[in-house]
Image (spheres, rainbow, N blue to C red):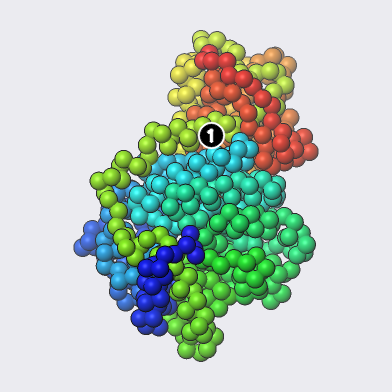
Amino acid sequence: MQGELDSESRRWVDDTLAAMSVGEKIGQLLVPSFYSSYTSSDSETYVELTELIHEYHVGGMLVFGARQPRSNLLLNPRAAQNILGQPLAAASLLNRLQAISPIPLLVTADFETGIGFRLSGGTTFPRAMAFGATGDPSLAYEAGRITAVEARAIGVHVNLAPVVDVNNNPRNPVINTRSFGEDPAQVGAIASAYVKGLRAGGMLATLKHFPGHGDTDVDSHLGLPLIAHPRERLEQVELPPFRAGILAGADAVMTAHIELPALESAPATPATFSPRIVGQLLRGDLGFTGLVFTDSMRMKAVTELVSPAEGAARAVMAGHDMVLHSPDDRVAFRGVSDALARGDITEARLDASVERVLRAKAALGLHRYSAVSLDTLPLVVGTRAHLAVARDISERSITLLADEGDDVPLTVGRSADVLYLSVLDYPSGWGVTVPSRALIPELEARWPNVTVIELSDRTPASEIALVRETASRYDAIVVGVFVRAASLSGRMDLSGELIGLLRRMARDSAGSGQPFVTVFFGNPYVATFLDELPTTLVTYDVHDLAQESAVGAIAGERAISGRLPISLGDRFPVGHGLLREARGAP
């Protein structure tokens, strides 16, 4: 939407920029955050946000979900604190903040899977890799359009998505299923469709994480990843999806907290602080003229290197327009101000970023009207039509890797005794998503005689042995394997004991002819450690919709048509996937 201004909007940008003080200009580069729980206008949180607007002139806001306190009395000391926020609470707070801001706020959010990713009741789409499994860019377009329509209804203007990283490292702990796949051309095509969908719905699209976060094995929330590939390899793999997204009209790019010696020779210098990567590569070689965001400045890849003041200053010096989610926005403001006073940042450089920020606001029409209607919001957010699109994508993404016993669809009768094993990486920190929450009732609706057992890395060896000893009593076994590749967890595997159990149970079942069906939720690369299992499906997600879709596929009620957008070892290459026609309910 950048560059599409009418004469009145151009005049607003020029007049606003000319009238701004240096402090007001600096503030436009800062994007603090808030949680979307109910916030009184007479609360400390609200007072802090208004202070950031009045005294620090911040240019935008980052919308998160909500957060609950963690009790030291809980048996689980790692219980998740993050919960979903509320759309009406977010919209109400944004309306109040817009009303007091002299310059309209550019509101951002990380809605990678729709606004339901952060806000309760909003539409939640599958993870990006599921779109790759469908092979249909038109679905990405529609998901982008719906996300934009719902986001604009609550007052959010910039989606910090799509992820265009090419996930070609099976040990990537932070991108993984957030990527559309490992083929650069396919990633670029699907991302481009998503960008066009966002723009069709009136929202700005952000390509991330430049210049490519897919081939790392370090979570940048926990440390500084390094990509050691030469420039030639980056041109072939990492950069093509960014080029495609820019051609599709992406309005913004978010850089990555990663070190790339082939592009920036200074040691311990992430892309966040590199003029060569932001200025020469992104602005120069790729010709990008839109907004450039930092990734969250609270990630350890940055906070362990520099203070909030130095981090903000160096990000602006590198060429960023907006500094996102600083550990301390007030200190960040002073850091940029001091750098300007020293001459490390020129006023011309500052003006260039501020003008881009103002142009983005004008392109969205925020200089005319920035409030949203709380009355019409419920008519737009989380509708049945939007959910139907999400369900269609989820069902079409289910990928059947192997079916040696021809057990999908599962043909045992409704009265069959079915053993369901819910197998978890570890039991803590699940939060919004609950393993098997939707899957168990879906199984029971089709086969009422279901015995459910949950296993994890904390299950005693004696209980694991008992599961194997009693498994032969059942007419069929279904296994749901839930393994996360989640930011900040530092984990992405199934325990060796559980892998051993599944292998032994598969051999036992093969000898007796007992159906043994395994579904992988979350990290699909876990399937490479269990490729000898007779019947396996992959969903690329852990949420309720994926669980529901998986049971429909097992029961034969939905066709199975997904194809791998990644390779899973030598046995399952990109494009692999067994097809099944729908046969109806069991």
Instruction: Please identify the quarter of the rendering in which residue 55 is found.
Output: bottom left
Q: Would residue 455 be visible to someone looking at this image?
A: no
Q: Residue at x 43, y 81 (%)?
A: 334
Q: Give residue 165's quadrant in the image.
A: bottom right
Residue 348: image location, x then y, percent:
50, 83
Q: Position of residue 386 (x, y in %)?
A: 42, 37
> Can you say whether 350 is above or below 217 in the image?
below
Residue 567 screen position, x and y as percent: 72, 41
- Residue 344 occupies quadrant: bottom right
Q: Residue at x 73, y 60 (%)?
A: 235
Q: Is residue 246 above or below residue 418?
A: below
Assess disc 1: are there few (<14), some (14-19) or many (≥20) residues with their C-alpha within 10 Å of its C-alpha.
many
Number of numbered discs visible in the structure rendering = 1
Does the rendering let one see residue 558? yes
Label 1 sits on what residue type? Answer: Ser
Nearer to me, 532 or 214:
214
Please say if 295 is above or below 265.
above
Q: Residue at x 49, y 74 (%)?
A: 353
Q: Nearer the viewer, residue 540 or 493?
A: 540
Left or right, 135 with reference to 393:
right
Q: Position of residue 466 (x, y in %)?
A: 59, 25
Kindly state the secondary structure of the residue where label 1 is placed: helix
Residue depicted at x 43% and y 52%: 202
The residue singled out by tag 1 in the image is 394
Q: Name the foreground residue: 437 vs 496.
A: 437
Between residue 462 and residue 553, name the one nearer to us: 553
Check the image and name the residue furthest to the front: 7
| Residue ranking furthest to the bottom | 342
